[in-house]
Image (tube, coloured by chain):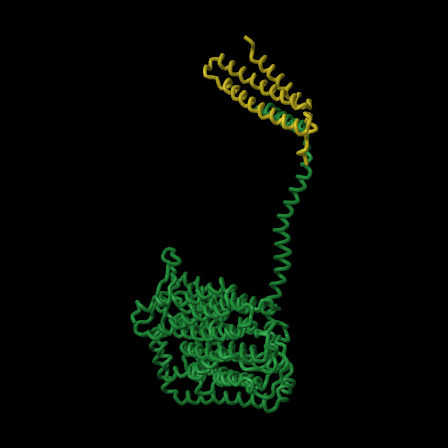
Amino acid sequence: MVPLSYYLLLSGILFVCGVLGFLIKRNIITIFMSIELMLNGVNLSFVAFAAHWHMMGNLRALSGQVFVFFVMVVAAAEAAVGLAIIIAVYRTRETLNVDQVNLLKL
Amino acid sequence: MTPQTLSPLLCTIPLFPLAGAAINGFLGRQSSKKAISAVALAFCGLTFFVAVFIAANFSSASAPYSFSLAHWLRSGSFSVDFEFYLDQLSLVMLLVVTGVGFLIHIYSVGYMWDDDGYYRFMSYLNLFMFFMLTLVLAKNYLVMFIGWEGVGLASYLLIGFWFTKDSAAAAGKKAFIVNRIGDFGFLIALFLMIKHFGSLDFTHVFAAVRSLPAETAGTGTLTAIGLLLMVGAAGKSAQIPLYVWLPDAMEGPTPVSALIHAATMVTAGVYMVARSSAIFERAPMAMMVVAIIGTLTALFAATIGIAQTDIKKVLAYSTVSQLGYMFMACGVGAFSAGIFHLMTHAFFKGLLFLAAGSVIHGVGGEQDMRKMGGLRVYMPWTFLTMSIATFTIAGFPPLAAYFSKDEILWKAYSSPYGSWVYWLIGVITAFLTSFYMFRLWFLTFFGDYRGASAHDGHDPRTGAPAPHGQEHGHGDPHESPWVMLGPLVILAILSFVGGWVGIGGRFEHFLAPVFQSGGTAQLAQEAAGEAGGKWTETFLTLISVGVAFLGLYFAYLLYLKRHDLPAKIAQSLGGLYQAVANKYYIDELYAALFVKPLVDGSTTILWHGVDQGVIDAAVNDSADAARHVSDKSRHMQSGNLRSYAGWIAAGGAVVIAYMVWMGVR
């Protein structure tokens, strides 16, 4: 029986990795992967809490599990749209460096 | 003819001219002038025909007639309908307005034919007829007020008809604004009536008023209503202190001056006061104010008329003066005498203006009498008709104004409300009237022609084109066409015989049902006074005819026999003559007292202070603030994706830190 805090610690490490990757990396694809990392970090804490409450005796504590499915669906949709955007950006700008995709500034 | 069949005709009377105005107003630009004239004259003539038909079938026994066209306001127990009403008083007004109006429509065809705005002019004239007939036929004060405001609008449009001329546009505005002051009083009187009687219907209000005792103390609701109505009447009918707009209104085309500013619209105030006779009879103080204002105006305007050189200005001041007579009559309780003079005045003053228009037309737009003279040779018909009008207004028997003016003077002397002071001022005014009218007559038609014979058809003072076409070069003065002379002749006949309806008090008896407010004792007293004062009346009549001759003689002496005298007299009078010639500086006084403080106050306080300092400043400063803040904060939008992510992460960190610190769960 792994204690809850381990899961949460791992979840936090994954999330922070995602944030740092998002902030540091310049390649759009990598940034994209960092977002997935953050989402899955959160997912992990969802299921961890769900399992925790289930074990504590609340047999109906399934909302954490359900949320994870929602997050997966949204992440899949986001990946589809996001990748399409990335391809469109690459076709016009011929780069994947986000620092060079800044035409919308003032 | 029964009231059931006659009453529905009432609503057609105002609607015909409205249709004419709409057709000419919307389609006139594309139509030929012949079609425009046909439409305008047909609808106006139709109205006149209906009016005559109604008059022919009118019976005093079944009067008053009334017809409700539609509901208007319903609010609790208070209601106002579009209702028309015909009694003896409205019938007189109806015939005067449609009859004189129709003649002036015909005249306008000749006078305005060469003007570019011909269709506009005809449309406005018809519109005026619509509003004037609404005013006259209304059954309650609110519908009357529609007409009242409407004729003001028509008057504004027609005074400023040649709106490219600055003076005309300014005169239109002046008329409108001065009338607004009067209308304000009228409106408050209506509110008082709603408050105290719960109705604006003539029948209800007068019945309620008649059940009240007379307010002899000089204070109270009825006195207040009466005085406020008089404020309205003073505005519309150009009485002191609101008369200043009427002389300026002469900037309009001459048929307009004849129709609106002499024969019909300006008498609306007299009609309204006479219509409200029940109220005034219960408020003797208000009556006295009416009489005093009327008397003073009559004298005041007549003195100004003496020194004017513009032919239309003389007639304008004469109109103000004659309106003063009518108010004097109303003020001494002789409402039927006031209405009688209103009717004869419509004939002879309409004629005077139309004849003056014919003169102006004949000499190519010149209005200065000093540049006329000797015109009787060139325009015999105009001379003939104008002479009849001049002798009429001066009060020579047996012409129309002799009867009506004499009636007023006698009533001013003999009525229980009257006094010899009113009579004396009235007689002095009659002398002045006779003098300035014969002065005009001699200057215009006698002596030698003093104008430039090769006139270019332009008004020399303003440079605006004369109302008359320029295609035939203006050589010698010439007679006007018959389309203009016809109405002159008809009006001359009416000015001659129009007063005969009053012989033996027939006119007064005809109107008696309207003004008989149950004061039988007063009527009996009047009858007794008349029977006892036969000699006094004859004597007073002789005096007023005498002063008419005196005016004729003085005018003859000064303006025909001894040309040099007027200038000498003017010089010896010095300052007084200057004051009279400059209309007692009333316009300047009003400008200094009211206009300038208003303009200055509006400029410094309202414009620079409130509008620019508060309202504009609030809007502009908030916009500036938003711009400055945005200017600073826009640098956050660097376009750098990772910096945005940084902001989000930082924000998230702050929120989490806050939650941890506050212990939010």
Q: Residue furthest bottom?
A: B561
In the picture, residue B342 is in which quadrant? bottom left
Q: Nearer the viewer, residue B485 or B520?
A: B485
Q: Position of residue B133 (x, y in %)?
A: 42, 69
Residue at the spot x=64%, y=86% of the render? B567
Chain drawn green in the picture:
B
Res B284 visible: no
Please name the color used to draw chain A: yellow
Residue at the spot x=41%, y=61% of the render? B194
Q: Position of residue B200 (x, y in %)?
A: 39, 63
- Residue B198 placement, left or right of A100: left
Q: Quadrant of the N terminus of chain A?
A: top right
Residue at the spot x=58%, y=82% of the render? B477
Q: Residue furthest right?
A: A100
Res B543 visible: yes
* Residue B35 higher or lower than B419, as above or below: above
- Residue B614 placement, left or right of B262: right
Q: Quadrant of the C terminus of chain A?
A: top right
